[in-house]
Image (cartoon, coloured by chain):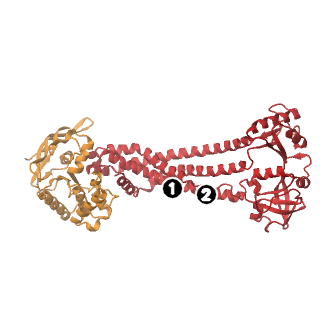
Chain colours: A orange, B red
């Protein structure tokens, strides 16, 4: 059953950084609504505030001003432990630099988010194995990240993002460290997840990749410049 | 859940660089010192109680004061003599008093000459039996001396075992002591009193003759009627000897030692040694702990992005705290295990060397399981304690900032 309606809503969101006597307005009054199953791309030059915005949507950072609703819940005033819970359950992160834990094998990395949700070991292992096999990494389960190629690492990271079956996947420059072929594969996968009902938000500065999205927001100086 | 964190901690320890391990030398040294101290301390304590238990608690030892005061020659030490023995025997609470000799004598066998300790055994049976029983004397070969065993001796264990004359010494062999021939009737069992292991035992009358002791004696040992009165009897002997010699309190040229005095002296020395080693251990452990803290601070800095990632995938602050505490505990634990191994190695070596040097089982190597368990648990806790601040810092990192690295 695919859910309908809005899942994420940003209302007049600001994020300021105090750098001594100057204030940097990384995000400066953003209003965005994202529905279930949307594939949204956020594009813009570096320093435009797209990663900051992404971090706030992902409950990794708190807005200076404004409200962010995730599934109707305002996440701006929740304690860190609840935010951690939300991140773990509802959101899957994919990073430009993959961010795999270097001492853990591929399968252990995929198991990690489930560990923090107190999923029993055997169940975790089973699901991680299924996810990795599905994505064509069945032969690499017990390899450490430094024994994997960039494309393989990103696939492990994608499995990790899917581990707790989140509703939202946040991908911050997921293709930035990959060659164009591998990059394309990753975006294709995101597109597929979106068709399966997941909400995808992808930050990129690569317009080629952004075209896969249903909707593109252009950010400049912390403001959305197209609507 | 905790098990998962341990697993995570273990896998993180694998990538530790050499420098991280080097900072833990303090833990190795500290734990090794504690372990060897305790395990040797126990062995030593057993050895010492062995030495003195063999003397019994009903024994007083009277001897000359070691040194006299005043210009040389003015205080020629008066040796204890027959008269003193009489005085002591007259003291209330004394069952009997025996002269003891500990001399060095020339012993010859198989044309090899050795200088050995020679000591006496009373001619009379009751006194002799008491010396045997309070000294725990038993033979490995042959028998102990009996009344009328003139011209016969019993030798310590090392005569038999160590082949010091280049030829085996067994019961029935004859040996020259100060030029007189003696027949060996027994070889003693190994004693915890290592003095006995190298001694030749002969009857009073033989010793007096061989060593020409005359009226003088080296020590007088006193058996008291009731061990509980040992202190009081010692005080009475002091008083009588003072009166007899016209000496004032504090100017005695003799001393009366109770078993308690002896134990006190020894335990004071032991305590001093233990305090020094414990001090070294404490300093090392603090240095080691600071090493762990330092390592963990560095680790938190190096792994900011990893911490951010874990938070992004749902780790709560407490989870991060636990992960890092366990990791730092395991770091301490690793140091502790190595320290325990080194410590046991040291105490084993010391006991072996001591036993070779003294020719007996003077210090038994001990490895009490509680000590190992305690050392291991302690080093883990040490890691946790010293890792607390860096772990707390790690747990408080803001996810977005941490992810930026």
Q: What secondary structure is marked by label 2?
A: helix
In this picture, residue B274 sits left or right of residue B327: right
Q: Quadrant of the N terminus of chain A?
A: bottom left
Residue A32 or B142: which is nearer the viewer? B142
How packed mark 1 is, by other alpha carbons closer than 10 Å (few <14, some 14-19, many 20 or more), is some
Q: Nearer the viewer, mark 1 or mark 2?
A: 2
Residue A135 appears in the rendering: no
Res B89 quadrant in image: top right
Residue B158 appears in the rendering: yes
- Position of residue B3 measured from the top left corner of the image (x, y, whole percent): 37, 54
Q: Tell me the residue at 76%/54% (across/down).
A: B195
Residue B204 or B41: which is nearer the viewer? B204
- Position of residue B336 measured from the top left corner of the image (x, y, whole percent): 49, 52
Q: Earlier in the sequence, mark 1 or mark 2?
A: 1
Q: Chain of mark 1?
A: B
Number of marks in the image? Answer: 2
- Label 2 belongs to which residue? B348
Residue furthest out toward the top? B248
Q: Chain of mark 2?
A: B
In this picture, residue B53 sits left or right of residue A7: right
- Label 1 belongs to which residue? B338
In this picture, residue B158 sits left or right of residue A190: right
Q: Tell me the residue at 11%/58% (across/down).
A: A195
Residue B16 or B235: which is nearer the viewer? B235
Q: Are marks 1 and 2 on the same chain?
A: yes
Res A2 quadrant in image: bottom left
Work out whether B385 lies above or below A125. Answer: above
In this picture, residue B186 sits left or right of residue A30: right
């Amino acid at each position: 059953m695919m859910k309908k309606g809005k899942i994420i809503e940003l209302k007049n969101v600001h994020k300021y950084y105090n750098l001594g006597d100057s204030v940097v307005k990384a995000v400066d009054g953003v209003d965005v609504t994202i529905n279930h199953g949307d594939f949204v791309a956020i594009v813009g030059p570096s320093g435009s505030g797209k990663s900051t915005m992404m971090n706030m949507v992902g409950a990794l950072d708190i807005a200076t001003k404004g409200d962010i609703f995730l599934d109707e819940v305002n996440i701006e005033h929740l304690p860190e432990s609840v935010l951690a819970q939300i991140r773990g359950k509802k959101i899957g992160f994919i990073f430009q630099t993959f961010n795999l834990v270097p001492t853990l094998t591929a399968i252990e990395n995929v198991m990690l988010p489930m560990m923090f949700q107190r999923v029993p070991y055997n169940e975790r292992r089973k699901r991680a194995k299924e996810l990795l096999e599905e994505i064509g990494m069945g032969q690499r389960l017990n390899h450490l990240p430094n024994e994997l190629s960039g494309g393989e690492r990103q696939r492990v990271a994608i499995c990790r993002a899917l581990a707790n079956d989140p509703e939202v996947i946040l991908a911050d420059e997921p293709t930035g460290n990959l060659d164009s072929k591998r990059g394309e594969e990753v975006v294709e996968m995101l597109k597929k997840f979106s068709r399966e009902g997941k909400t995808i938000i992808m930050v990129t500065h690569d317009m080629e990749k952004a075209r896969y999205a249903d909707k593109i927001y252009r950010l400049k100086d912390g403001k959305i410049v197209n609507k | 859940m905790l098990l998962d964190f341990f697993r995570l901690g273990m896998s993180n320890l694998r990538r530790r660089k050499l420098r991280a391990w080097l900072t833990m030398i303090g833990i190795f040294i500290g734990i090794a010192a504690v372990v060897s101290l305790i395990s040797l301390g126990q062995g030593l304590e057993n050895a010492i109680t062995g030495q003195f238990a063999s003397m019994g608690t009903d024994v007083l030892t009277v001897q000359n004061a070691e040194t006299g005061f005043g210009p040389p020659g003015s205080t020629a030490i008066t040796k204890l003599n027959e008269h003193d023995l009489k005085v002591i025997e007259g003291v209330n609470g004394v069952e009997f008093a025996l002269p003891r000799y500990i001399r060095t004598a020339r012993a010859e066998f198989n044309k090899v000459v050795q200088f050995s300790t020679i000591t006496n055994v009373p001619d009379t049976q009751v006194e002799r039996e008491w010396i045997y029983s309070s000294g725990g004397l038993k033979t490995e070969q042959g028998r102990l001396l009996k009344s009328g065993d003139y011209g016969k001796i019993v030798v310590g264990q090392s005569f038999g075992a160590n082949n010091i004359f280049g030829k085996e010494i067994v019961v029935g062999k004859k040996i020259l002591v100060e030029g007189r021939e003696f027949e060996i009737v027994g070889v003693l069992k190994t004693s915890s009193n290592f003095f006995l292991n190298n001694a030749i035992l002969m009857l009073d009358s033989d010793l007096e003759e061989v060593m020409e002791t005359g009226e003088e004696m080296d020590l007088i040992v006193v058996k008291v009627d009731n061990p509980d009165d040992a202190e009081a009897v010692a005080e009475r002997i002091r008083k009588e000897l003072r009166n007899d010699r016209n000496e004032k309190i504090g100017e005695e040229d003799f001393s009366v030692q109770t078993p308690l005095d002896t134990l006190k002296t020894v335990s004071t020395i032991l305590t001093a040694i233990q305090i020094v080693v414990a001090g070294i251990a404490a300093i090392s452990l603090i240095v080691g702990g600071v090493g762990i803290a330092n390592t963990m601070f560095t680790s938190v800095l190096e792994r900011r992005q990893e911490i951010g990632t874990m938070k992004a995938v749902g780790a709560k602050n407490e989870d991060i705290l636990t992960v890092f505490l366990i990791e730092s505990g395991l770091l301490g634990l690793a140091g502790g295990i190595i320290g325990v191994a080194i410590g046991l190695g040291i105490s084993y070596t010391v006991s072996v060397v001591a036993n070779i040097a003294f020719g007996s089982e003077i210090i038994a190597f001990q490895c009490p399981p509680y000590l190992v368990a305690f050392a291991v648990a302690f080093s883990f806790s040490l890691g946790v304690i010293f890792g607390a601040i860096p772990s707390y810092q790690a747990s408080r990192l803001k996810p977005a900032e941490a992810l930026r690295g």
